[in-house]
Structures are given as C-alpha cells and as structure tokens.
Image (cartoon, rainbow, N blue to C red):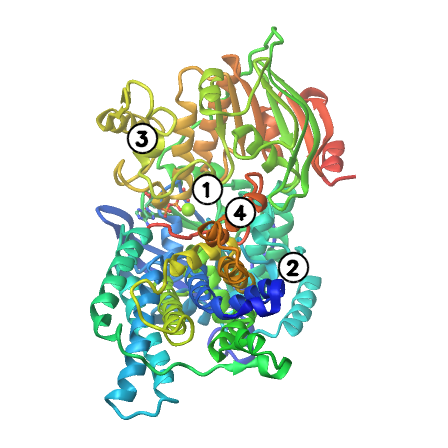
C-alpha cells in the first residue's frame, strides 16, 4: 500500500503550488430527491488534496447521484460544495471543470459516431471556434505518446469495445488536466490486470501530489490496494468514513449493508450426461465496419456445463454474443441449439428456451424510455397469462413486475419509471430478473453479467448461474473478469483476434498460458 | 424550346440544363434538413416551409416594386431575405412544439406541412396573377456558344452557386468547428453533450431554425428563379423529397449536393425527352427520380451493416 501524502502545506500556498496541487473538496449536507424517492439525504464527504478516496455503497445507495450533484449534472435540493474552504456553486460540468474537477461517468459519455480525436478535442472547454486539425492531431499524438494507455485516434468510438471506451473516458480527463478525478466504476469493464495498470498509473499521480481521486467501486480488492480513505453511503444516507488501513473488508461490508453477512458458497454438482446444447460450426461474423470479427469459431456447450470465454475486450466477444442473441447475422457457419439450426427468431428462442444477459444491458437488452414493468415483460407480454389473444393485459404485467422487483430487489421509485432512469446496478438487475426468472431455461448466454453490481449482488448472481448449471442448464459465460471465470467455469476458452487461442478444463487451466493467450501471442 | 434544331444532342443538354436549374430547391432544403437531423431532430415540415418561402419571396418581390417603389434589381433580393425569415418563423414553431415532452417529431412535422402550405395558399392568393421581378442569373451559355438554345439552357442563378458553396462549407463546419462538433454530439448522444455542459435544447432549437432558414431560401428560388412564378402547385412535394434525400445522402452535406444534382437531373429526363419528340410514357419518365432513388436505396442498403452516419438520437422522443 502506498503512503499517503501529507496534505499540501496549508496557509503558505504559493501561486505556483496552487496551480499544481489539487484543491481541497468538501460536500456538506447534500440532499437530492427524484419525485418521491429520496436519493440523497444530508450526505457529507471530504476529499483531501492528494488522496485516493473511495465512495462505497450498495446498488442504488446514491453514489452516482452524489457525484453528479458535485459535477453540476444534477441540481441538488440542498447542500454545499466547499472548495479550498470556500462555498462554491457548481451549476454545470463546465463550472466543475473550472475548479479542476473532472468525471468519468458510469454510462459512457463519448459520442459513438465521432472519432477518438474528435471526442477528445470536443471535450476541451476552451472557446476556439475553428479547429486546426493539423495542429490538434500533432498535439494529440504527442499526448498519446505519453498517455498511460494508447488508443487509435482515427477510429470511431462506436467501434471500440467497452474496455477501450472506458480507457478513452479516463484519457479524456487526463487530457483536460483535471485535478480532482471522479471515477464512477471505472474498472467494471477492464480485466483485472488492465484495472491494476490503470489504477496504478493514476495512483502514481496521486502519490506525486498532482491529483486527488474520488472513486466509486464495488471491488474491495481495488479499495484496499489503491485507496487511502473511504466514505460509505447506505440507502441515500451517510453511513461512515474512515482510513483504509484501519478497516477490514468485513468492516466495510458491514458499513455498506448495515449488518454482517456471510457469503454463501454454492457447490458444483458433478454432471454425468454429456448432451450438447449449443454447437457452433466454423462461425464467421463481421464487425459494424464490415471487417471480420470472428474468424471461424467452433464450440460446443453441454448440459450442466459452464463454458467461460476469457479475453481482452474487442477480440470478437461482442460479435459472438450478438450473433447468438440474434442482433447480428453470421456471414458463414452455423449455430445449432439442441441439434437444430438456430437463428434466434422469437419462436426459436421460446422453443429452445434460450436466455441472454448481454453487456451494456441498457443498450442491448432494454428499451430505455419504456417502464421497468414493460421491460420486465419483453419476453412474455405476447403469451398468456400476460396476453389474451391479441390483447395485452397490463394488470398481469404489472403484477409480475411487482413480484420480480421484489425478488430481485430492484430499487425503482415505481414499476412505471423508465428503466433508463435507474442506477447502473438496477438496470442490470432488471435484465437479470427478466432472463433468470423463467422457470425452464435450457441455454443461458451471459456477457459480463456482474458489470457494475455490488458484492452482495455478484454473489447472488454467481449463485444463480451455478444453480442453473446444477439444474442442467448449458451456460456460455463471456467475461472480462478472469477471477469470475476461474470461479464459475467448468471449461475455459480464451478468445484473441476473433479466434479461440486456448482451451482447457478448469482443473488444468494454467494461469500463465491464459495470460499469454489473452495478450495475443 | 426549339430543341429539335440540335436534334438528339438536346437530350443531354436538356438534362444538364434541368440539373443546373432544378436542383437548387432540393439542395437548400436538404442542407437545412441535414443540419436539423445532425442535431437529432427531424423536420418533415420543411415542405410547408418551402411553400411559405416561395410565397413570401414572390409577394415581397412584387410588392417591393409595385407598392414600395423599390428598384426591380433589389426587391427580389429582399424577397429572398424575407423568405429566409419566414422560414425561421416556421422553424421556431417546429422547434418549440417538437421539444415538448412526449411529442413526436414526425407528428409535428406533418402538422407543420399542413399549416405551412395552408398559410402560404391563404396569404398567397392575391399574388397568383401578378408578375414579380425575378432574380438575375449568370448567362454561362453566352461565353460558350452562340447558339440561342445552348444559351438559354445554361443559365446559372447566383442562389444556386451559393448553395453549391454552402455544401462544402457545411461539411467543414461539422468537421472542423467546435459548434459543428457539438451539434453532432447532441444528435448522436445527448447524454454526452450534457456531460460537456452543452444545452441540448438550445442547440436543437438553433439547428431547426437555421435549417428552416435555408428551406425558406429554397422556396424563394422556386418562385423567383425557376419555375419563377407563384402557384399552389409550385413545390409538388420537392420539400418532402429533399427530406428523404438526406437519408439517401447519409447525412453528409457533400453527398446532399450530389444527391440534389441527381434529383434535379432525373426530374429533367421527362421534359428533355419530350422536347425531342418522345412524349410516349411522359408521366413514366417523370417518375424517374423516384424509381432511381428506390433502386439506389435497394442497391446500397444492407441489413448487415448499420446505416452509417445516422445520428444516434434521431427522432427519439423527449423524456
Ligand atoms: N434521473 C433519475 N430519475 C429517477 N430516479 C433516479 C434517477 N437517477 C437515479 N435515480 C434513483 O436514485 C437512486 C440512487 O441512484 P444512483 O444512480 O445514485 O445509485 P448508485 O449508488 O450509483 O448505484 P449503482 O451502484 O447501481 O450504480 C436509485 O434508486 C435510482 O433508481
Ligand atoms: Mg452508480
């Protein structure tokens, strides 16, 4: 663990120091309501200069709301922001930038139809109207050369994988010279080694006294290895603060949940029968830009087996899942489910009982403007009991929604709230509730299913996936979290450059060989 | 036209002349719509705006000379300006209505077509008969040929040249200016724009109004250049076609220019053939622009690729 820097010599701050050192940031008694829902209730927080501060809490605790209020994205109902001991008004992200505060949001905020370079240049808050691209590109290339991670400047952001988009968000803040960096779950989409690399580089800046960081994370490992202090929220209220050195993981979990909780391990049951459920034969598919993303993939997933697919984002995982989910058509090759050709039509999905948990669920598995109840019913609204002939029965939909909201603990003001307004974790829960609640599942395809979920929910989902497997469900688990894959899979495959580069039963999996294959050697 | 004199050569000449004469309204409306759609809004109402522009330009040009003692060299230009302003008025209404919560762009657009054309017909009744001074054009043909046929075919309006220059200017604006990038951000991902402190509503409001200004100018071209009169059938759906043309041009101003020229040319196929004596299937040839568009759409669209260039938030309903 790195040493904490003593805060900058107060009182005698020279002009030069003031320019380099991050300011002292305090939030006092902040409150925010959304309609009748109290998202924040008198919350206070203090980020000292040159510290790495973690903001913890369950899904829906109000973490994102708090930082969005600090950024001027939301207008708080009550409360003060104090910068260097002076109360300041932050009415827009522009004001926040003026005080050196920059944020990486939980939902990506780069513009998909623009290139990396355009996104970076546009994010700058200066006033020049005309952009001299020659000059800007030279400056950007110089910036990229020194940046902790590299991205191709001319690529459209929409074609970047989730992990690369996240890197862009962080790069953007470094490019803007932000002094206080607010990171909302920046590592959910990164592999553990990528996350360590990114956080390590940011940590160095903090240790050098150039940056303060406020990070929202659900991963205790990151908190204990990179952070100095934590503040915990519980159900919109302040639940405690403290130095990381003085706290154990159990203490932090208790602060978050308000009670002690033991993880419940689920045992794997040995499966004897070998019945293939999902078979891919020489599958090829293209990316959006027409280049080939999958170069002939062969795969069989059997009943009662979890096949894990590891890989760095952008190596064809997204396209593979999209083909299986029916969002993209294969250019050649075949997908078979239960021995029959499968094209993911609504009829086939229902007949073969195939369920999908895609990545970026708000975009891939929800209709953001439709209500939580409607989104929960997307699989079932056209069949009894939710439909009678051509009629949709809204009472039945609402009733089922209320039940699912209850069992999956979706935190939403009402079932009628648009799903796009929910917190990141609660969007994920909504999709999970829809996909995992069906009584008979045959094939489950999950892509990064624990993206942005708090540890209790991660445990719950892992338990659900394992128990599905034990019931005989064939599971294809695509994840960028190697720990998760090693914990759940029966068989592990590494995808690299659109091909399978490594395969082994989990008992024989060799960590060095996996990393090697993931890096594309 | 006495095109028979130069025989079959009249066909390509007729099409060329038609292209130079007839594409400007498409160009102005499609550039206006391109600007609007880049910001994430659809303005179908530009058909109504076009008619309002045509009517007000004609009326002002006429009234300027007959009532307000303007010189006939100036009054049509004032007409053009007023047409733009009338367009902006229409744009303001559309921008305000279409940004109300739970309001659909298309519905407002259709209402605006009906409102715009109704208002233009109502206010324009007294101007159907009188002859208003027209805008001057450059006599390109005089430099090239002594044949009066060629000379009358190759006339180019300064408005058309303005439109042709506007296309690359707009392309540059979207690529190399900060406001241009902001407009694209607002159209593609309003959340991202908000995170940068850009007001989505304001940007869209300005884009719709500016786009409608251009459509108004397109209307002025109809009544003051070609065909150069004010009747109720003057636009014959060109405004609507220009809106579709933006999709065809993949939201790219330069391609809007090519597409407008293409439409203008295709429109002239029927008349050019008729001029050399082929009048069988005249109506069929008049449908050429539509058939060609359909064909190109079918050939270039693919379900396997996303429609590149479509602004991500295009036409989505406000909160
Ligand atoms: N724009 C909004 N409209 C209505 N309710 C909202 C809105 N934004 C957030 N909420 C609600 O406020 C509560 C707090 O949400 P917030 O996004 O701050 O949670 P969080 O702590 O960041 O959770 P997560 O870990 O899941 O990201 C949630 O119940 C959420 O549904
Ligand atoms: Mg959040």
Is A314 on the left or on the right of B242, as rendered?
Answer: right
In the image, residue A411 sits, relative to residue A25, either above or below, namely above
| Separation of marks 3 and 1 at Cα, in angstroms | 20 Å
Q: How many numbered tags mark residues here?
A: 4
Count neighbours of disc 3 (C-alpha within 10 A) and say few if under 14, some if 14 to 19, many if 20 or more: many
Q: CA distance from mark 1 to mark 2?
A: 25 Å
Q: Chain of mark 4?
A: B
Residue A153, numbered circle: 2
Q: Which residue is mark 3?
A: A405
Query: Is label 4 or label 1 in front?
Result: 4
Residue at the extreme top of the image, as rendered: A272
Q: Chain of mark 3?
A: A
Q: Mark 3 CB in 8 Å range of ligand 1?
A: no
Q: Are marks 3 and 1 in contact (CB under 8 Å)?
A: no
Measuring from the top left, give residue B205's x and y in whole percent: 34, 66
Mark yes or no: residue B188 visible: no
Please give the residue where the numbered disc 1 appears in the rendered image: A363
């Amino acid at each position: 663990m790195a040493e904490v820097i003593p805060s900058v010599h107060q009182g005698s701050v020279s002009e030069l120091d003031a320019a380099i050192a991050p300011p002292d940031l305090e939030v006092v008694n902040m409150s925010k309501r959304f309609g009748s829902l109290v998202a924040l209730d008198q919350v206070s927080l203090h980020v000292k200069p040159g510290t790495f501060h973690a903001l913890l809490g369950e899904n829906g605790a109000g973490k994102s709301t708090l930082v969005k209020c600090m950024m001027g994205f939301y207008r708080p109902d009550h409360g003060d922001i104090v910068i260097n001991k002076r109360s300041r008004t932050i009415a827009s992200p522009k004001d926040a930038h003026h005080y050196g505060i920059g944020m990486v949001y939980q939902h990506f905020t780069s513009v998909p139809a623009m290139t990396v370079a355009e996104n970076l240049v546009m994010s700058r808050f200066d006033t020049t109207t005309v952009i001299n691209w020659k000059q800007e590109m030279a400056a950007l290339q110089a910036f990229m050369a020194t940046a902790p991670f590299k991205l191709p400047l001319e690529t459209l952001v929409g074609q970047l994988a989730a992990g690369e988009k996240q890197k862009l968000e962080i790069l953007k803040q470094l490019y803007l010279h932000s002094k206080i960096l607010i990171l909302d779950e920046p590592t959910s989409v990164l592999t553990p080694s990528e996350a360590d690399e990114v956080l390590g580089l940011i940590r160095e800046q903090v240790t050098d006294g150039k940056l303060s960081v406020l990070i929202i994370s659900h991963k205790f490992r990151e908190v204990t290895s990179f952070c100095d202090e934590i503040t915990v929220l519980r159900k919109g209220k302040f639940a405690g603060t403290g130095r990381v050195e003085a706290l154990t993981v159990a203490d932090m979990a208790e602060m978050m949940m308000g009670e002690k909780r033991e993880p419940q391990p689920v045992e794997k049951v040995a499966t004897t029968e070998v019945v293939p459920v999902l078979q891919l034969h020489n599958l090829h598919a293209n990316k959006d830009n027409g280049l080939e993303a999958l170069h002939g993939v062969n795969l069989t997933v059997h009943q009662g087996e979890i096949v894990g697919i590891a890989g760095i984002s952008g190596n064809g995982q997204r396209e593979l899942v999209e083909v299986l989910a029916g969002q993209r058509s294969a250019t050649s090759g075949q997908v078979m489910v239960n021995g029959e050709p499968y094209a993911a039509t609504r009829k086939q999905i229902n007949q073969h009982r195939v369920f999908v948990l895609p990545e970026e669920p708000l975009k891939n598995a929800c209709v953001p403007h439709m209500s939580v109840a409607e989104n929960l019913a997307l699989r079932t609204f056209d069949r009894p009991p939710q439909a009678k002939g051509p009629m949709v029965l809204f009472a039945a939909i609402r009733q089922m929604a209320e039940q699912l909201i209850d069992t999956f603990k979706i935190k939403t003001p009402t079932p009628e709230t648009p799903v796009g307004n929910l917190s990141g974790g609660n969007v994920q829960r909504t999709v999970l509730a829809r996909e995992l609640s069906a009584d008979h599942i045959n094939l489950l395809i999950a892509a990064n299913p624990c993206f942005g979920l708090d540890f209790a929910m991660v445990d719950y989902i892992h338990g659900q996936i394992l128990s599905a497997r034990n019931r005989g469900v064939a599971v294809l688990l695509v994840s960028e979290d190697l720990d998760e894959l090693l914990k759940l899979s029966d068989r592990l495959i590494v995808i690299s450059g659109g091909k399978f580069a490594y395969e082994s039963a989990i008992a024989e999996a060799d960590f060095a060989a996996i990393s090697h294959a993931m890096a594309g050697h | 036209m006495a095109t028979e004199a130069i025989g079959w050569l009249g066909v390509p000449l007729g099409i060329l002349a038609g292209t130079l004469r007839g594409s400007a309204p498409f160009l102005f409306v499609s550039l206006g719509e391109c600007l609007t759609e880049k910001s994430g809004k659809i303005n179908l109402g530009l058909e109504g705006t076009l008619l309002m522009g045509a009517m007000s330009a004609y009326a002002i040009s006429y009234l300027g000379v007959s009532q307000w003692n303007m010189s006939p060299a100036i009054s049509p230009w004032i007409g053009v300006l007023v047409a733009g302003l009338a367009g902006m008025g229409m744009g303001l209404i559309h921008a305000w209505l279409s940004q109300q919560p739970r309001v659909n762009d298309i519905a407002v657009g259709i209402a605006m077509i009906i409102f715009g054309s109704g208002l233009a017909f109502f206010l324009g009744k007294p101007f159907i008969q009188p002859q208003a001074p027209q805008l001057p054009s450059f006599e390109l043909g005089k430099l090239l040929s002594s044949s009066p046929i060629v000379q009358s075919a190759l006339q180019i309006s300064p408005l058309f040249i303005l439109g042709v220059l506007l296309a690359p200017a707009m392309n540059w604006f979207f690529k190399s200016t900060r406001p241009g990038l902001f407009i694209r951000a607002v159209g593609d991902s309003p959340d991202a724009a908000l995170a940068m402190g850009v007001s989505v509503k304001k940007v869209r409001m300005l884009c719709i109004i500016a786009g409608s200004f251009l459509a108004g100018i397109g209307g002025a071209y109809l009544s003051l250049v070609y065909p150069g009169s004010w009747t109720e059938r003057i636009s014959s759906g060109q405004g609507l076609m220009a809106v579709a043309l933006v999709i065809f041009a993949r939201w790219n101003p330069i391609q809007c220019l090519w597409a407008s020229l293409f439409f203008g040319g295709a429109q002239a196929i029927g008349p050019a053939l008729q001029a050399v004596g082929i009048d069988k299937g005249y109506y069929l040839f008049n449908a050429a622009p539509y058939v060609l568009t359909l064909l190109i759409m079918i050939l270039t669209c693919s379900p396997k690729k996303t429609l590149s260039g479509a602004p991500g938030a295009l036409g989505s309903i406000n909160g």
